[in-house]
Image (cartoon, rainbow, N blue to C red):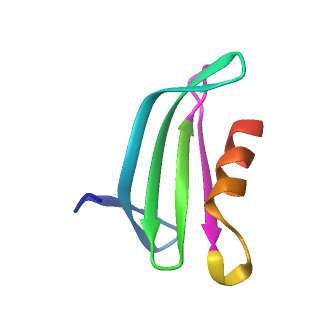
Amino acid sequence: RSSIGIFIGGNKYTFATYDDDCQVGDYTFKCVSAAKNKGGAHLVMTPGGYIVICVFDESRGQNKTTSRMAAFAL
C-alpha cells in the first residue's frame, strides 16, 4: 500500500494497486484500487476517457470483486 490516497465522500482511501493495461473482454482499462478499513474503491478509466468510481463497504455485505466488476459493466 501507498502512503498517499484520495478522499471520496469524506472517507480516506489509500492507493493499493495500479494497472494501466487491464483487459476485460475486448476493452482495455486503466484501474486503480484503493483501500480503507473494512472497504475500498475502484477507479476505472474507460476507453472513452471517463472515470468510473465504485466504492464498497464490507460491513454492508459488499466486496471488492463485485465492486470491480460493476465498474467494468458501466
Residue furthest to the bottom in view is 59
Main structural element of the magenta stretch: helix, strand or loop? strand
Residue 23: image x %, image y %?
59, 24
Identify the residue at image location x=62%, y=60%.
64
Look at the image and tell me whether residue 74 can be seen: no
What residue is shown at x 44% (from left), y 58% (from top)? 34
Residue at image location 71% in from the left, 45% down from the top: 69
The x, y position of residue 22, in whole percent, is 53, 29
| Side of 42 relative to 73 (left or right) | left
Residue extent of the magenta highlight: 45-57
Q: Is residue 50 magenta?
A: yes
Q: Position of residue 67 (x, y in %)?
A: 68, 55
Residue 10, how many percent across, how many down?
A: 47, 74
For this orientation, the residue located farthest to the left is 3
Give the side of residue 61 with respect to residue 15, left or right: right
Above or below — where is 23 with respect to 5?
Answer: above
Q: Closest to the observer: 32 or 51?
A: 32
Along the horizontal axis of the image, is 38 left or right of 67?
left
